[in-house]
Amino acid sequence: MNGSPPCAERRQRQPLAALLLMTLALLVSACATSPVPGPDGSTAPQGSADEPPAPTSSASGADSESEAPPSRPSPNGATLALLEQSARAEESGQLAEAVAYAERAVRIDPRRADLWTHLAGLELAAGDPETAVRYANKALSLARNRPDWARDAWLVIADAREAQGRSEEADEIRARW
């Protein structure tokens, strides 16, 4: 034996165990009572314990319109605003700015054929018929069940063909659509 009685060893360990228990209790209570910030950064309570928690966006990155916080505009609202800004810029003769707004709309909602057709028309107006045809073809690939969107894309292609000096091809497209 080392000369100290066993009960003396226990008395030396008790303050250390008590300190560890108090630290653990403080950590647990701090976690349980600290406010959790909401999606808007506020720390207001989400509701009573009987209510389910408010939905949050999934960790997989798949956002749906119903999961977006109400203060954040929906992609459709954002693209609509960008299209309006693009149209205003085009009307005032600022084609580069109009193209930039349309490109932002396409980045937000790249599966909408009408956005690609709008961008194609702007590129044509800016004097780039090759890019206009490329964007109109992208619109055609997305306009599956929308014959009106397909027609609009084909008419941009017809105008681009005319700008390229291919008037007969442009006339054929226009006659078809």
Image: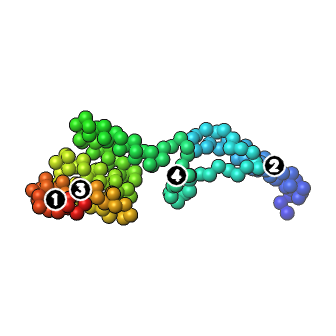
Q: Earlier in the sequence, mark 4 or mark 3?
A: 4
Which type of secondary structure does the marked residue at label 4 adopt? helix
Closest to the observer, 52 or 174: 174
Residue matched to label 1: 170
Find the distance from the CA under tag 2 to the CA under tag 3: 81 Å
Residue drawn 90% across and 56% down?
7
Residue drawn 14% across and 62% down?
169
Which type of secondary structure does the marked residue at label 1 adopt? helix
Residue 6: give x, y in percent of width and height: 88, 58
Mark 3 residue type: Leu
Find the distance from the CA under tag 4 to the CA under tag 2: 51 Å
Say if mark 2 contacts mark 3, CB within 8 Å: no
Find the distance from the CA under tag 4 to the CA under tag 3: 33 Å
Find the distance from the CA under tag 1 to the CA under tag 3: 8 Å
How dense is the environment of label 2, judged by Cα within 10 Å: few (below 14), some, or many (20 and up)?
Answer: few
Residue matched to label 2: 18
Q: How many marks?
A: 4
Mark 2 residue type: Ala
Find the distance from the CA under tag 1 to the CA under tag 2: 88 Å
Residue matched to label 3: 155
